[in-house]
Image (tube, grey):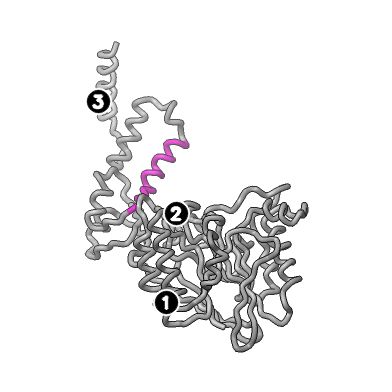
Amino acid sequence: MRFIHTSDWHLGRFFFGLHLTADQEYLLKEQFIPLIKDTKPDILLISGDLYDRGVPPLEAVALLDEVLYKIIAELKVPVVIISGNHDSGERLAFASRFLSEQKLFVFGGFNPDIDSVTISDSYGAINIYPLPYTEPVTVRDALSDKNITDHNSAVSEVLNIIKRKHPSTNRAIVMAHVFTIGGETCESERPLSSSSFAGGIDTVNTSLFNAFHYTALGHLHRAQTIGSNKVRYSGSLMKYSFSEANHVKSVELVDMDRDGNCTSERIPLTPKRDLRQITGFLKDILSNENRSDDYLEVTLLDEGALLNPMEKLREKYPNVLKIERPMLMRADSKFSNNRDHKKATKSELFSCFFKEVENKDLNDEQKIVFNEILDNINKDNQ
């Protein structure tokens, strides 16, 4: 059996004042759908965070509608979706019972009876168990189990129920939107619920998934394996923070044999515009012959003041989104460590300002001139 595992599309993402829907549309229509057409999976698994927020913008909803129609109606590939912590599970699962008849299986909340999707290949049946993102308190109340105090104990109990009901002759896949112990994080991931009890934690022990043939995880944006090759995060559709600049975004193409052993291939996705970080002096960056439409974070090494650096950079790099000035911050931090700004004299403040602008200290003559000007101003104000 062949399947594709993906997650964390975050459709409708708003990033530094820009809507990324057009970039997401390019990836899904020009790369992801052709990949499905070429590889011919038996099913597609999407492990949460389809949308970036619970009430997504209209263009994001329209994009998802179009993409799912092409995959299910035109390419005849069933799709299983679970909600993530960015999604509104109830909204996402609207009309899910009807849609399941059209091979779109959407799970937006915890069901104590434990849902599953069963598909078959030439070797027999495979059960897919969806675990949509759920607050621990919801699971505790639904199961009337006071021992559930955090995400780890909630997931543990749900998986125990699955293991008790799972037919021993069938292979098993779990889909979950969780933060596992040992997972590598980045800036764009929203922390999971803080509604744990008695000092509980939001991480989940990877060993809980050992009994299953494959675990398709969502939530962390870097593609990674956790503990073993059969527990995987597919990573996000595209880069959603500059901390992800070095990520290679991808989906997992997985083949499962008759015994449930999985062979996985990570298929990269190349965006229309990359998200990159560049570092250097302003004049050197501007003299670079290569114009770029990529989304950029620029770290300038210049120590003195610069006139309209963002405007100058955007003439050549129109999608510069952020400028960092570590040398100015360093100078400012040195002053702050020596004395609080509020307690500094006007002469000290001007000396600091002059140092930042000219990258040199005031000489004695300049100090005298400044103090004379300051005295004259004070006399005029008296």
Residue matched to label 1: 74
Q: Position of residue 269 (x, y in %)?
A: 41, 71
Q: Is residue 65 magenta?
A: no
* Residue 263 horizontal side relative to residue 284, left or right: right
Question: Residue sitting at 48 percent across and 53 percent down?
Answer: 53
Using the rendered image of the protein, determine whether residue 223 is visible from the camera's viewpoint: no
Q: Report the amino acid beneath label 1.
A: Glu
Question: Residue sitting at 76 percent across and 71 percent down?
Answer: 164
In the picture as drawn, the residue positioned furthest to the bottom comes out as 122
Q: Is residue 327 magenta?
A: yes
Residue matched to label 2: 56
Q: Report the amino acid beneath label 3.
A: Val
Relative height, residue 379 to residue 263 (above, below): above
Question: Residues under labels 3 and 2: Cα distance?
Answer: 60 Å
Quarter of the rendering occupied by the N terminus: bottom right
Question: Residue sitting at 25 percent across and 17 percent down?
Answer: 376
Q: Quadrant of residue 329?
A: top left
Question: Residues under labels 1 and 2: Cα distance?
Answer: 25 Å
Instruction: Count neighbours of disc 3 (C-alpha within 10 A) and say few if under 14, some if 14 to 19, many if 20 or more.
Output: few
